[in-house]
Image (spheres, rainbow, N blue to C red):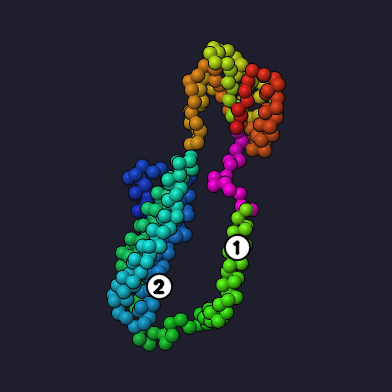
Amino acid sequence: MIGSGLIFSIFATLIVMMACGIALQRMSLAAIIIAMGMLVDNAIVVSDSALINMERGMRKRVAIMRACSATALPLLAATVIAILTFLPIYYSPHITGELLSSLVVVIGVSLMFSWVFALTQTPFFIQEFVRRPRPEELKAALFDGKYYNRFRNSLHWVLCHRSVTIGSLVVMLILSAWSFKFIPKVFVPALDKQYFTVDMWLPEGTNINETDRMASNLANYIRGHEETEMVSTYIGRTPPRYYLSNVAFGPQSNYAQILVKCKTSQESRKLHTLLQDSIRQKYPRTTDKSK
């Protein structure tokens, strides 16, 4: 019953994505994966509340309506808070905002749909498919059992030892704040890729044929290394945008860009370091801006 709400929420999100022109790509798919853990929360709360009301002896319809009316606004507030958590990413002026904007939109839409279906589809399924307990099946104590008793005893100990509990929480808070210095402050980690680019700048006004000749010589020099798998040369401007954060430049006759692909990412870093030193010596007129 709860899993069906997850399916409905994902289908509705895909419909909105199609209407808004959001493609299925890495960020939007990652948003769906992230949201899946939260999409079932609203349905769980509503169904659990309805079942508890029926365990207390309420009629099925009354139990369902009482569960929806009691949890609608708290669940809406929790859903909005979860959406607002991701909102700063959407408004980021950095390239992060452009890269991850679809992630924020998809998470927000899917979470709102989960709230809507929790208050519509979940009560309907409870009404149609969940049997109300018979009078002889009603429990004398709803929250009784081995695990409930352990939790109740733990909670009683915490309440009786307030000073120790609050002191421990303060120590853990300070310790966690101190531990933040060991976490790298990088929101989007660097890509471990097999390729890098070499930007070649010649003096202003250089003929494009001369730029082509020197770029070809430089490309042949790079091909001579055993780490190189493929070399592509672009004269006068950058290649077509092959990934989102690639910045287009040109046309300009004194500029060329060489895209170097190696067999592995380790060999790519090794060749990149080697070229940073050797290119300046072999081609003194070239400024190495490889990245």
Callout 2: SS: helix
Relative to 223, residue 191 above or below: below
- The residue that mark 1 highlights is 174
Q: Is residue 171 visible?
A: yes
Q: Is residue 10 visible?
A: no
Is mark 2 in CB contact (under 8 Å) with mark 1?
A: no
Q: Distance of mark 2 from mark 1, alpha carbons?
A: 36 Å
> Which residue is nearer to you in this view: 73 or 107?
73
Q: Residue 82: within the magenta?
A: no
Q: Dot 2 surroundings within 10 Å: few (below 14), some, or many (20 or more)?
A: some
Say what amino acid the circle numbered 2 marks: Asp
> Which residue is nearer to you in this view: 157 or 15?
157
Q: Residue 234's spot in the image, x, y percent?
A: 54, 22
Instruction: Name which residue lies at 54% across and 45% down.
Output: 188
- Please give the label number shown on residue 40: none
- The residue that mark 2 highlights is 48
Query: In this picture, which residue range is highlighted in magenta?
Result: 182-195
Looking at the image, tell me whether mark 2 or mark 1 is earlier in sequence order: 2
Does residue 238 appear left or right of residue 68 in this picture? right
Say what amino acid the circle numbered 1 marks: Ile
